[in-house]
């Protein structure tokens, strides 16, 4: 199922349903390919992690989501302070070396305790170009009856799985079976997806050269 970018997004703030949608930011990776401390590296005048957190905070303030949790390493005081500054909820990962799947699992476990949480908007902490209008388009697709997984398809990188990804609660039990760095693409059975066409791109920052490439574009 594919949806084109809406000319005018729906207005989720008009629905009580937004309270059942919570963001989950994954920010517990050690950033070894980057050389360590990736999410605290400076991009512009802020730490890299500040950008996705700001988008989640803005979505909450606009009534698009009911709240936001952020999975961070247990010993990452800088990220903890940043999460608290944005008035989001930290989820402390005591075993970040267990991989992406473990961060997903403990993050979703925290969301299960959030009253009425029916879907999670999975946001990656190393994507500083994530945009609020993309978040709104994904949420609008959910209200329009999208599938259990809804993700953006960026115009500049149509063959690359896009983020953020909305995951309905019906899919969460499948995520509990993942191991290591397996992500949503490894789910079995494979849930149906809705793709929402959006402009631009939203690259990961995995290495220092990735960050430098973004800085060149920003100049």
Image (cartoon, rainbow, N blue to C red):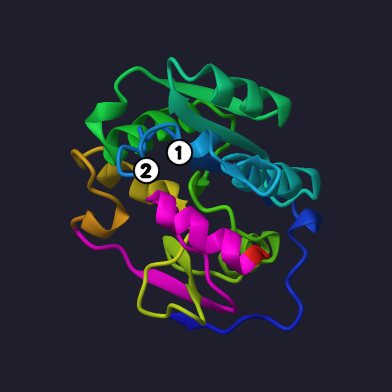
Instruction: Return the x and y of residue 191 as percentages of the image width and height.
Output: 30, 63
Q: Which residue does the image show at 67% across and 23% down from the upper left?
A: 84
In the displayed structure image, the side of residue 215 where residue 159 appears, left or right: left
Quick check: 111 left or right of 187? right
Q: Is residue 20 magenta?
A: no
Residue 34 is marked as: 2
Q: Residue at x 50, y 63 (%)?
A: 213
For the point 48% across and 47% down, which residue is it?
126
- Which sits in the foreground, 198 or 111? 198
Magenta part of the protein: which range? 189-217
The residue carrying mark 1 is: 38
For disc 1, the neighbor class at 10 Å (few under 14, some 14 to 19, many from 20) is many
**With 178 as the anchor, is 169 left or right in this view?**
right
Q: Relative to 94, is 141 above or below?
A: below
Residue 46 location, quadrant: top right
Residue 204 in percent (x, y) is at 44, 56
> What residue is shown at x 58% (from left), y 53% (from top)?
128
């Amino acid at each position: 199922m594919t949806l084109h970018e809406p000319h005018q997004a729906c207005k989720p703030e008009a629905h009580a349903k937004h309270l059942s949608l919570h963001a989950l930011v994954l920010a517990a990776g050690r950033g070894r390919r980057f050389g360590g401390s990736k999410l605290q590296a400076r991009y512009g005048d802020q730490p890299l992690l500040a950008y996705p957190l700001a988008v989640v905070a803005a979505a909450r303030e606009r009534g698009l989501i009911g709240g936001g949790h952020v999975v961070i390493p247990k010993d990452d005081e800088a990220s903890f302070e940043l999460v608290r500054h944005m008035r989001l909820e930290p989820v402390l990962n005591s075993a970040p070396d267990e991989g992406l799947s473990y961060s997903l699992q403990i993050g979703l476990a925290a969301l299960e305790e959030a009253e009425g949480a029916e879907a999670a908007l999975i946001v990656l902490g190393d994507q500083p170009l994530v945009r609020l209008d993309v978040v709104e388009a994904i949420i609008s697709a959910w209200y329009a009856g999208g599938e259990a997984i809804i993700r953006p398809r960026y115009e500049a990188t149509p063959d690359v799985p896009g983020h953020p990804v909305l995951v309905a609660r019906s899919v969460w039990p499948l995520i509990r079976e993942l191991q290591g760095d397996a992500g949503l693409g490894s789910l079995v059975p494979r849930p149906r997806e809705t793709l929402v066409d959006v402009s631009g791109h939203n690259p990961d920052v995995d290495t220092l050269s990735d960050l430098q490439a973004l800085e060149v574009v920003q100049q």
